[in-house]
Image (tube, helix red, strand yellow):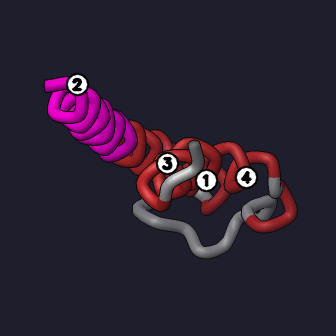
């Protein structure tokens, strides 16, 4: 079943793929940050963002699973 929480989970997991596949958005050298061209630091920033989004998705998934198991357990008693 599709729930708003599962939609958020999917968006968290899909966002990094979209960001990296849309090469035209970061295929440039400016702005340079501490001597590193945009192309490189943008990708490295997405490593951190992807990690954070994956953690959020995992925590939401765990919460959703606990809620589902609690609702199934409560309905059968």
Asked whether the beta carbons under mark 2 and mark 4 sit within 8 Å of each other, the answer is: no
Q: Nearer the viewer, mark 1 or mark 2?
A: 2
If the image is split into quadrants, where does the C terminus sit? top left
Q: Residue at x 41, y 61 (%)?
A: 34
Q: Give the range drawn in magenta.
A: 55-77
Q: Earlier in the sequence, mark 4 or mark 3?
A: 3
Q: Which of marks 3 and 2 is nearer the N terminus?
A: 3
- 3D distance between C-alphas at marks 3 and 2: 24 Å
Looking at the picture, how far across and down is residue 28, in whole percent?
A: 77, 65
Which residue is identified by label 4? 18
Q: Residue at x 68, y 55 (%)?
A: 19
The tag on residue 76 is: 2
In the orientation shown, which residue stands out farthest toward the bottom?
Answer: 31
| Residue 7 makes an appearance in the image | yes
Asked whether the beta carbons under mark 1 and mark 4 sit within 8 Å of each other, the answer is: yes
- 3D distance between C-alphas at marks 1 and 3: 14 Å
In the image: residue 11, left or right of residue 4: right
- 3D distance between C-alphas at marks 2 and 4: 42 Å
- 3D distance between C-alphas at marks 1 and 2: 38 Å
Q: Which of marks 1 and 3 is in front?
A: 3
Which residue is identified by label 1? 15
- 3D distance between C-alphas at marks 4 and 3: 18 Å
Q: Which of marks 2 and 4 is in front?
A: 2
Prevailing secondary structure class for the magenta stretch in the rendered image: helix
Q: Which residue is drawn at 35% across and 36% down?
A: 61
SS at badge 1:
helix
Which residue is identified by label 3? 6
């Amino acid at each position: 079943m599709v729930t708003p929480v599962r939609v958020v989970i999917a968006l968290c997991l899909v966002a990094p793929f979209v960001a990296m596949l849309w090469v035209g958005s970061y295929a440039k050298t400016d702005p340079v940050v501490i001597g590193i061209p945009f192309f490189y630091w943008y990708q490295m920033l997405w490593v951190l963002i992807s990690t954070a989004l994956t953690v959020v998705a995992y925590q939401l998934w765990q919460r959703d699973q606990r809620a589902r198991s609690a609702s199934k357990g409560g309905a059968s008693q």
